[in-house]
Amino acid sequence: MLETKSIQSSSVIIINPKSQGGATENNTVLSKILNELFHKSKIIYTKKHGDATRLTRYYLKRGYKEVVAVGGDGTINEVANGFFEYDEGSNNVKYINPKAIFSFIPSGTRNVFANSLNLPMDLEEYIKKKDELKPKKIDVISAQYTIPGTKKFSKPRLCCNAVEIGAGAEIIERSKLVRNKVNNRLLSTITGIISTLPAYESNLCEIILDGEINIKLNITMCIISNGKYLGGSFKVAPQAQIDDGFLDIIIVKNSGSFKMLKELISMKSGVYYEKRNILYFRAKKIYLESKEREVSLSLDGEPIGALPASFQVLQKKLLMKF
């Protein structure tokens, strides 16, 4: 029997019912948890992309002290962005309420960010650990990227776990297209890999780290990471710490076709420092520009933009319970 203790607070629960392939909507364990722990909290269900950000801002401005996201990495990203607003004057993001707490219950297919925070991904195991969770300030990535098909830069958008650039972002985008028709993550991921890697060409890119280190080389994929994990269990950034004020940059050099798949497999354990085709850097600010064709990027597993793009770490900017 799962023992729970009622939580009484001015909290709002934002649930993505379509997360975990739609399983969240009818998850009886989750319903039990919400009824027993959060029965005095306001519960809201999202209906479309962007709802979680809009709802988070709405309730924080009305005095709610905690927002709990229920969903996968995309839902967590949207809620995290809802804690901030864009400041036209400074071209930066600003807190709505710096004392508000961000919590989440992992209910996605992979729960990559939960893995990076060393949280249980099983719901009942997560709740057993819930009393141990404390609010801590974590870093987030602020990203500005090119809006696809234009030459316009986006407003800053926050990223909790990682940015994928190049082949990784292409695989994600194609996988999602397949998943819109066939609700099977494994099948869609395999299809994304098969349809991307054989034809993917490396691009000559310029990478500037902290305004000082300038690198020009052909890259197949670049990862800018705040957390250790990618894709659930790939420990791509073994040195990453969620609150150290640095971003970890992993570059897979010119290694087209299925050679890149071999490199990815070698990265699974996080031990790949002797690989000649993989470079590892740490920096606070990064700028990337493709010197050839348009290169896609994704934030926290969501395809969103293209190069050129700039990224910077916002140290200990988000108060999160984990």
Image (cartoon, rainbow, N blue to C red):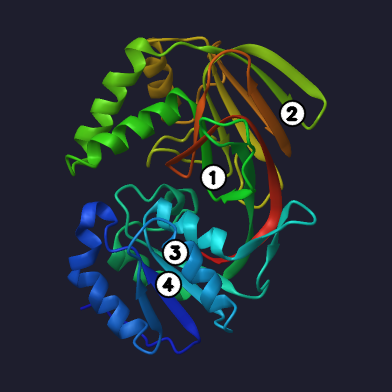
- Residue 140 vertical placement versus 201 (above, below): below
Q: Which mark is residue 209?
A: 2
Q: Dot 2 surroundings within 10 Å: few (below 14), some, or many (20 or more)?
A: some
Which amino acid is tagged 3? Ala
Looking at the rendered structure, the secondary structure element under dot 3 is: helix
Measured in 3D between alpha carbons, the distance from the residue under mark 1 to the one under mark 4, in whole angstroms, is 21 Å
Mark 1 lies on residue: 227
Marks 3 and 2, the one that precedes in the sequence: 3
Q: Residue at the right extreme?
A: 212
At numbered mark 2, what does the secondary structure look like: helix, strand or loop? strand
The crowding category of the residue bearing disc 1, from other C-alpha atoms within 10 Å (few below 14, some 14 to 19, many at least 20), is: many
Mark toward the start of the polypeptide (3 vs 4): 3
| Mark 1: amino acid | Gly
Dividing the picture into quarters, in which one does residue 273 lie? top right
x 75%, y 51%: residue: 91
Q: Which residue shows up at 37% across the image and 42% down it?
A: 232
Q: Which labelled disc corresponds to residue 130?
A: 4
Work out how far the residue at label 3 is from the one at label 4, CA to CA, in angstroms: 23 Å
Q: Quick one: label 1 or label 4, which is nearer the N terminus?
A: 4
Determine the CA span between mark 1 and mark 2.
19 Å
Q: Is residue 191 left or right of residue 115?
A: left
Q: Is residue 202 above or below residue 180?
A: above
In the image, taking residue 251 as reference, residue 75 lies left or right, namely left
Q: Residue at x 39, y 10 (%)?
A: 259
Q: Position of residue 141 (x, y in %)?
A: 62, 46
